[in-house]
Image (spheres, rainbow, N blue to C red):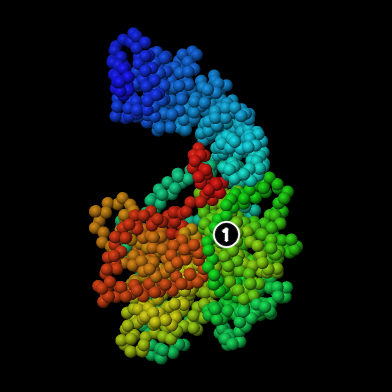
Amino acid sequence: QSCVPSSSRALMLLAQLEKLNGETLLTDAEAPRQISNKILHLIQTQEKTRKELMTKSSSGMEVILASLERTRDLQTTLNILGILSTGRGVCVLVSKGGTGVLLQLLLSCGKETPPNEELMMQIHSLLAKVGPKDRKFGVKARLSGSMNVTVNVVKQNSHNPRLLLPCLQVLRLYSSNSVNAISLGQSGVLDLLFKVIGPYSRKNTSSLKVALDTLAALLKSKMNARRSVERRHVSLLLATYLDWHRNDSRHRHMLIRKGILGCLKNLANIKLGRKAFVEADGMRILYNTSVDCLPVRTLDPLVNTSSLIMRKCFPKNRLPLSTIKSVYQHALPMLPAGGTVAQLYNQPPGVDDVADDSDDNEDAELDTDNDMESEQERHSRNDDIETDINKLRPKPVQTRPYEELKMYERFFIELSEDFQADVTSKPLSPVLIPTGQAPPTVPETEGISVTRVAPQVAEADLPGSLSRLTLESSQAVLEVPDTAALLPLHDPDLYIDMTKVTHSVPRYSEVAYPDYFGHVAPSSPEPILDRAYGVQRTKIFQDIERLIHPNDILDKVVYDLDVESCPAIDDGEALKFNSQFESGNLRKAIQIRKFEYDLILNADINSNHYHQWFYFEVSGMRLGVAYRFNIINCEKANSQFNYGMQVLMYSVQDAIGGRPQWVRTGQDICYYKNHFSRSSMAAGGQKGKSYYTMTFTVTFHHRDDVCYFTYHYPYTYSTLKMHLRKLAEKRAEGVYLREDALCETLGGNSCPLLTITAAPESSKHEHLNHLRNRPVVFLTARVHPGESNCSWVMKGTLEFLTGSSASAQTLREAFIFKIVPMLNPDGVINGSHRCSLSGEDLNRQWQNPSRDLHPTIYHTKGLLQYLSAQQRAPLVFCDYHGHSRKKNVFMYGCSVKETVWQTDINTTSYELQEDLGYRTLPKLLSQLAPAFSMSSCSFVVERSKEATARVVVWREIGVQRSYTMESTLCGCDQGKYKGLQIGTRELEEMGAQLCVALLRLHRLTSPLELRTHTHLLEHELPETRCNITSPTTHVLDEDEPGDLEKVDYSAESDDPDDEQNEQLSDPDTFG
Ligand SMILES: [Zn+2]
């Protein structure tokens, strides 16, 4: 017998078993018992047999399962279960329908009284292995009706660990199905599990862990969670957690503690649960235990989950304001017909006073699984792609009659002027400058050099007037840093003159020092900040301490615009704040602790939201102390402050000492969802009802300093006017530069329109003809006031265009530039982030701008329509923007093909002919400008963007090269500036490089040269396709696309069941 190979022995035995299965009457129980016993023996001792019997191709599994179904003999059943659990063929078992056979066996076994313990254990052990491999396990179990058998076994054996563990494991598998979870909850499993959980004990910890996981899975159902809260399980769980926290001193059972927290976390998803948690002193318990756990790094998962639970349960507060509507209102000439502004005006008074803690709908938002969220995001993004092929065809439409458009003729006098006077001498081109006296000319030798000023000013000797720079006292004894050499376009006195004719809604009478002194770009690079470990958690714990130790909180208002005359509190104990100057927007400052302040930003005028931009002044600081600042009413769901962006600080002491510059500063920066909320009605029906905190910490280096903090390098309207005046003065020979006032804004400020080209060589017909035949390039910027970076890009463009370089001259000879450098002066002046005084986003008004409410858009569009009517539609249109959530500089354009490729429109029915010319300019920029990234560009037309400048100019005016150029507020992650935050030098360079790219575009598009350069366009073709198929080219929102780096800044967490996942990831990303 020993010479028969074991495999053939096994096959022989199988054959015998199969034969027995075929017999109609099973009289002999002994034969199958013996055969199955022999197979079990073989399989336990010989690896080879095991493999042979359990492969998918062999029929071994079928024979064995058939025998299992057929036999009524206990020993045979146990033998077969032994065979099945010895092998590694669980997948084969599942694929051959083994789950059903086992569940049937469980059901019939459950009918015996009492059920056989050994059999129960074997079946459950095997099911515990099978379940995870069978995706339909939960459904099969429910349909078979066998779940109750398991529940009963657990009920009767809660003190029998040998049987309890496998049964609980199977129960956990049942519970992961949401329908099962509800029915198990109804049959009393919650109470049953609490019986198993009990107080701290070192025995049976495996069962305990599984019981906790099962409970957590059941509590995902809101019905179960409610039932559980009613049975006072929240306090029970908290007591158990405390019990384990105290007894598990060597942290051997971290997973059990985490399991308890997992249950609490799910209970906190319902309002009832949060209330019970707070009432059971949960905040204090989890806070104190977390403080104990903090020093032990391996306990981070406990701290993170605790922090997540505490954040969920932290009572929602309303902002400490009487209303979230902007402090300042501006009377409009007419009320917008619809939209958020009309809604705001029609709101019943006090509607925004409602702190919204009412509904469980919010839970969905709080608890949304990360994957789901991105799924939804992707879904809504695809929804946003324009699929109406008619809307995708650029259609030049003449909406206004030509008679009316003729009013724009006066903005194009260069096309009709005869240049009879000597065109080469500077003053003759009709420079139209707004009011204001002639700038004082300062001989360069007279200025005090920056370096000489420094040693002369001792810190203590600062004049008292330093704390305020008002328009009246502007001629103070201040030592103004002489920056004439470094900042040719800056002149402090001229700046003051310009501010005097700038109209702000709050009627500002002060000037901020940085705007007065000017800003010199720092010479050393400023790297993107590395995020320190655990920053967010630390900050959140400090926030939670406010609730735990309320007596430590000062809660002292030190600055408040809502109070008449805004009394500045000066008791020597608090910092002094001020923001009442152009582009400033701090509304309220509250001292929380000795060195910590909550700051609230003002909403855009005639609005109750859009807080992101900030600009304010701080004085009265102590030396060498770390101050924490929290801007507590941010609204964006995420921010580059989570990815290395720092705030900007300007020190007046440093400026006087020879370093007049904004410096990237601040440590411990992070951005996260906080405990302040507003009603969805107050948010204009927006989904996000929670506010976010942007926190940063700063240590000051000078006593008696005046420092400024801002979101990004400020660029005020008065600065623009000063720059335009200086540009006109300093422009190179032969530059034709004209400044017209396009229109007046709602706030009574003039909107400048620049015309730049090369003055004709002479007034001869051919020279005039040459000028009049130049194509137009149309540039606009700063429609969004909070995007000050784009003004610096525009400054770079203007300096290049009026400069003396040979390429600038060639470019001027090639094009007529029409430039509106600031489409939203009122927003900029009044410190708004997004809107104009009408409370609307001007870049959503291009389709149908109102002459009364959106004059700058109405008339800029008018200029374009006039050009179009003259058959002179611009060659290029580009609107400069800033991007708060992405790195680098990039463009959005419009392409029918690339849009269609993103959708399921049947393209074969439309023979799409599209010139690839729209790709040339971005392509050239990616070769020329180090900050520019081609891979971030997108040429998809979205429905939500149909009223933006880019889409309307493309569709209605017929400009194929119509772009939005987005510049990062943070920094670059590619190219020469990789890893660096962006500064004004890089932004200005970008503006200049756009000009260089336009020059190359001119060479490529002029008919003579086009033929020789077609290779460039052809070369782009293959790349085109691969670029647009990548998801990164798709854009959710003009200014805020959805594809962001992953950092969990809000209260969401990963699936707690996925242990490995949680341990692998950075703990700081949780809670
Ligand atoms: Zn923008």
Q: Nearer the viewer, residue 1 or 21?
A: 1
Q: Which residue: 29% across, 62% down? A: 1021
Q: Quadrant of residue 920?
A: bottom left
Q: Residue 440 at x, y = what percent?
A: 58, 85
Query: Farthest residue in the front direction?
Result: 3
Left or right of 507 in this view: 97: left
Q: Which residue is mark 1?
A: 603
Left or right of 911 in this view: 361: right
Q: Which residue: 60% across, 59% down? A: 667
Q: Nearer the viewer, residue 764 or 926?
A: 926
Q: Residue 988 at x, y = what percent?
A: 48, 72
Instruction: Indicate whether 553 appears above or below 520.
Output: above
Left or right of 538 in this view: 40: left
Q: Residue 504 at x, y = what percent?
A: 58, 69
Q: Residue 335 at x, y = what percent?
A: 51, 61
Instruction: Indicate whether 578 appears above or below 210.
Output: below
Instruction: Indicate whether 289 appears above or below 634.
Output: above
Q: Which residue: 39% across, 84% down? A: 759
Look at the numbered disc 1 and say if its residue's Cβ is closer than 8 Å to ligand 1. Answer: no
Instruction: Indicate whether 1070 appears above or below 118.
Output: below
Question: Does residue 242 appear anywhere in the picture?
Answer: no
